[in-house]
Structures are given as C-alpha cells and as structure tokens.
Amino acid sequence: MKERKPGRHYFTINIDEPYAPLVFEVMKKGEQAKGTWTEGDISFEEWQQLAFPDLATATEQRVKEQMLRQLRSLADSLPEGTREAFQLYVETESLESRIANAPFSEAKSLMKRALDMHLTLREAGDIISSEKRFGTFLVEQGLATPEQILDALTLQKNSTKSIEHIACEQKLLTPQQVLDIFNAHEEMTELFCKTARELGYLTDEQVKTLRDIQMHERPALGEILTRMGVLDTEDIQKALEKFFASRSHSS
C-alpha cells in the first residue's frame, strides 16, 4: 500500500467499476466514496491528475440509462384509457431502442418528445376522469340514471373530431395530404400522426397542438346531458357547484 502523505484526504475505490470515472465528480461536490482498489489508496489530489477521456461519454450513458428507466415508468402514472395510447406511441416510435442507441443530443430530443406526449395524454386523462367522476356524482345525487350517464359519455366520445379533420380546419394539412397519409399508413390516430411527421407534413409541435385542440373541443358532459333533455342548464350549474364543493372538502 502506498504511504499516506500528511495533509491529504484519502479514499479508496474499485477502479474496475463502471462508475469509477464519475467518482471524482462526486468528490468535487464534497461527497465521500469508499470501496477497494487493489493498487492501494489514492489521494484526492492525485485523482485530479488522472486523465479520463471517456468521462463525458460515461456521464451521458448514465443519463441515458436514467431516461430509459423513466420512460418505462411513465405509462404507470396515466389513467387506464390513456396508458394504452402512450404505450402504443412508445412501441410505434421504437423509443427505447432509439434512445439507447442514439447520440446523446438526439436521445435527449426523443425523451423530450415522450415527456410532451405524456403531458398531453395526462391532461386529457384528467379531463376524462373528472367528467366520469361528475357523472357518478349525478347518479349518487339522483339527478340522472347510470344508463343516461353511459349514453352521454358515449355521445361525447363519438362527437370528438378526428385529428385529420382538425388538421384541415386549422389549415395545417390539405385534404390531399390527408389522403397521402392514409395511403402511406392505413391505421388511424397514433400512426396517422407518426406518418404525418415522417412525410414532413406536420412537426411534433403541430401534432401536440392538434391533440390539445381535439381534447378541448370535446363537448362537456353537462352539455351532452342538456342536449339529451336529462337536465337543464340550471340543474347542471347547481350540480357542478356541489360536485366541486364536495371534491374540495375531500381533498
């Protein structure tokens, strides 16, 4: 073992561990690490003089590993209805393998795209979940029957415009471009957006905007129930006030 020199701070580490090049960065933050190193102890000052040309690469690899762990856990935080949509998105985009194998800058961009999609779906899921809870509340209050709420939710779902319809309304796509996309890929929704991006017709930001519009153009459950003649506007307003009051008391 090397002779320890006075006035120096020592630690030991197994140099064969994959995290070894990162330890010095930890040391700089005042942390301490302990392990074994067959060649003996090395001082903080001596470690500073060692060259690790792969330090940046090793750090980036650790970050990419963290990205992949986060990507795998994102779907778990979504409601059931939107969880499958996110999983389909991850699969059709081959995000796991692309993040694992892409250069670091591209991997960060792919991860940002996944996080943006997750946020959009989570917000959509929150709206849908809240309206389902409101429907349950109306049944509990005796203001509607379960069958009426189910019919209203079905009508609401069927009244949502398609992504391609909204894209034409927003003048982001022409009808001919929509046909081009359908010809390039016959499956709908998720793959429609993916194909539109691949053809260069839409950007990621435009796809996100279209999804936001699609979700926020959905008629509210109360509006559907009014159209069905189950409740009038005044009844809906009173029910909403009681619903939100009950939620605030329970939270």
Image (cartoon, helix red, strand yellow):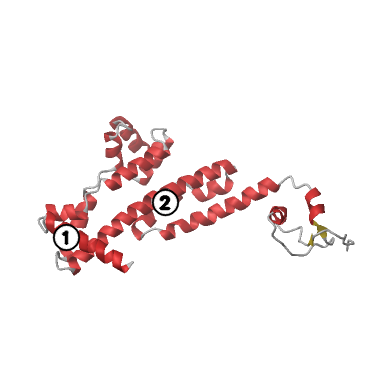
Quarter the C terminus occupies:
bottom left
- Mark with earlier residue (2, 1): 2
Residue pictured at 21% horizontal, 55% vertical? 221
How far across and how far down the image is residue 96, in percent?
52, 51
Of discs 2 and 1, which sits in the foreground? Answer: 1
- What secondary structure is marked by label 1? helix
Residue extending farthest to the front is 7
Residue pictured at 28% horizontal, 39% vertical? 166
Quarter the N terminus occupies:
bottom right
Q: Which mark is residue 230?
A: none
Q: Residues within 10 Å of mark 1 (few under 14, many from 20)?
A: few
Residue pictured at 82% horizontal, 63% vertical? 38
Q: Say if 169 sits above or below 10 in the image.
A: above
The residue beneath circle 2 is 118
Q: Three-letter amino acid code at disc 1?
A: Lys
Q: Say if 244 sits above or below 119 in the image.
A: below
User: In which image quadrant can residue 209 be found?
Assistant: top left
How far across and how far down the image is residue 67, in percent?
54, 52
- Spatial CA distance of label 2 from label 1 is 34 Å
The residue beneath circle 1 is 238
Residue 188 appearing in the image: no
